Image (cartoon, grey):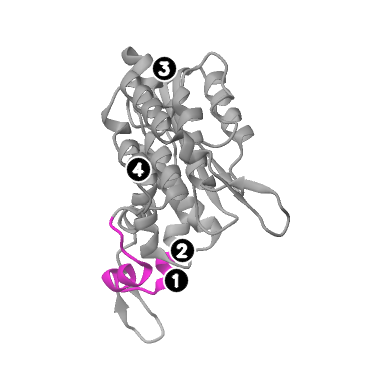
Amino acid sequence: MYKCYICKKQFSEGSRLNSAIIWEEYTRGKQTYKQLAKKYNCSQRTIQRKVDLHVITVPEKRPRKVVVLMDTTYWGRNFGVMLFKDAYTKENLLKYYVKTETNSLYIQGVKELQSKGFEVLAIVCDGRKGLLQSFDNIPVQMCQFHQVAIIRRYITKNPKIPASIELKEFDALLKMTDKESFESGLELWFNKWESFLNERTINLETGKSYFTHKRLRSAYRSLKTNSKWLFTWYDNYGLKIPNTTNAIDGHFSDLKNKLRNHNGLSKERKIKFIDEFFKA
């Protein structure tokens, strides 16, 4: 209780706001500054100050055998987060805030995990050019979902010509078949459509010729080239390697959904929110 000796009025101190509780409701309860201010009968600036005061503590990671999922997501053009996740325990092991996604950063991340005592049994990643070949003595699985997306970009979601329709239907079986069946099926498709793929068109202005079905050829070449890494999970069955990075992609989607409740955050506050999310 307090008493003013000038006006003789007595009053009691209001209940103190708990920064940890407010932070929990803000990050996991999806409540905005405005909603929390109304709940605690205070200003939005007070809530913001309490959120800023909260300190995030990240527990130590226990070194062990891991299969590393790795991928990057972006907010705008110049701000993204590169995440390294354990496929076995679903624990987030390491992250970098990045402007651009580079192979050198992925290599650096794997080496940092190894320097901390982690034994990297295998890696699952997308099909970035040059990345699949960057890890000596570590099996690398290319995400089959990303491969399907690559084919879709080349021949569209609804192809019209029969060869493209057949390749799209064959590609859809990628996640449901084994290595031998896939490779033999791809060879059968190529033998059937080889002459079609080799058709050329002459440019009447220059007199030079070019492949008529360039995008279809690129789609086939992508499958043929990447087949070496599409079934690493099959060649190393005992390691229980996932054939996609869906676990990390779903994590990114969940994070972005939560951040949509807090549009307009400064970069520093967004980083703090992301730190908390990946710690959980």
Give the magenta part as a residue range. Answer: 29-48
- Name which of mark 4 and mark 2 comes first in the sequence: 2
* 221 on left or right of 258: right
Amino acid at circle 4: Lys
Tell me how far mark 2 sits from mark 3, CA to CA.
Answer: 39 Å
- Name which of mark 4 and mark 1 comes first in the sequence: 1
Amino acid at circle 2: Arg
Tell me how far mark 4 sits from mark 1, CA to CA.
Answer: 54 Å
| Residue identifier under label 1 | 45
Tell me how far mark 1 sits from mark 3, CA to CA.
Answer: 44 Å
- Name which of mark 2 and mark 3 comes first in the sequence: 2
- Name which of mark 3 and mark 4 comes first in the sequence: 3
User: What residue lies at 30% left-to-right and 70% top-to-bottom?
Assistant: 35
- 10 Å crowding of disc 4: few (<14), some (14-19), many (20+): many
Percent across and percent down for residue 42 are: 35, 73
Amino acid at circle 3: Arg
User: What residue lies at 70% left-to-right and 49% top-to-bottom?
Assistant: 208
Percent across and percent down for residue 269 are: 50, 57
User: Foreground mark, 2 or 3?
Assistant: 3
| Residue identifier under label 2 | 49
